[in-house]
Amino acid sequence: MSKYTGVIFDLDGVICSTDRFHYQAWKAVADKLGIPFDETVNSRLRGVSRMDSLEIILENGGRVLSEDEKLAVAEEKNEIYKGLLSSMTEADLSDEVKNTLLALRSAGLKLAIGSSSKNTKYILKQIGLGDFFDAISDGTNITRSKPDPEVFLKAAEFIGLSPAECLVVEDAQAGIEAAVAGGFDSAGIGDAAACGKATYAMNGFADLKAICGV
């Protein structure tokens, strides 16, 4: 029997990877603003909301913009990003992730998404998971981004469970910190596995089957 009743997944870097698209879109707007932007700066944006990401980029370039200018830049970035997302297909969902999700679902676990992305539903549709999850908490229904736990707390609420009944799966340290702040156990993959704050450090997505006892 599983230790958990529900599993809440971050999207980018966990279910699928859109990092390359985020990088290309932010690079395009940073170049236009004359701000240096590279992989080092980009790594600071993982798990961070669009507006907070823009603040990091502006700070790095020593630029100050009005609120209206910031909104315009953020919207331009998102339009570039959405254009790149249109190239995603079901081939962007790995067999490991797909088979693990099916195993968790077959075991009766409730599955939800907890992502700061406002494009979550579109991405899930592109990779063939549009109707798969029991609930989606994303950038369209939260006011505070990770490491605030709001997105995970709402996901748990949407599937009718307490934080103690849920496992959060994350690839970013900010996401693990959000899980801890919300009272959730967490499973980290990639950077999140190495940060030392996750309940479980995973080598691969399939490790979730053993963690959840399915």
Image (cartoon, rainbow, N blue to C red):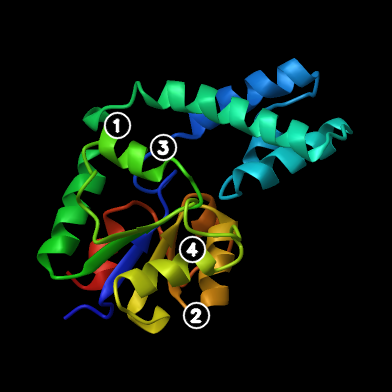
Q: Residue extending furthest front?
A: 68
* Residue drawn at 87 percent across, 32 percent down: 63
Residue 69 at x, y percent in the picture: 76, 31
Gap between marks 3 and 2, in whole Å?
Answer: 26 Å
Label 2 Cα neighbours within 10 Å, binned few <14 / some 14-19 / many ≥20: some
**Dot 1 lies on which element?**
helix
Mark 2 lies on residue: 183
* Residue drawn at 42 percent across, 54 percent down: 10
**Dot 2 lies on which element?**
loop
The answer to whether residue 111 shows anywhere in this view is yes
Mark 4 lies on residue: 151
The answer to whether residue 200 shows anywhere in this view is no
Mark 3 lies on residue: 17
**Dot 3 lies on which element?**
loop
Gap between marks 1 and 2, in whole Å?
Answer: 32 Å
* Residue drawn at 72 percent across, 17 percent down: 31
> What label sits on residue 92 in the rendered view?
1
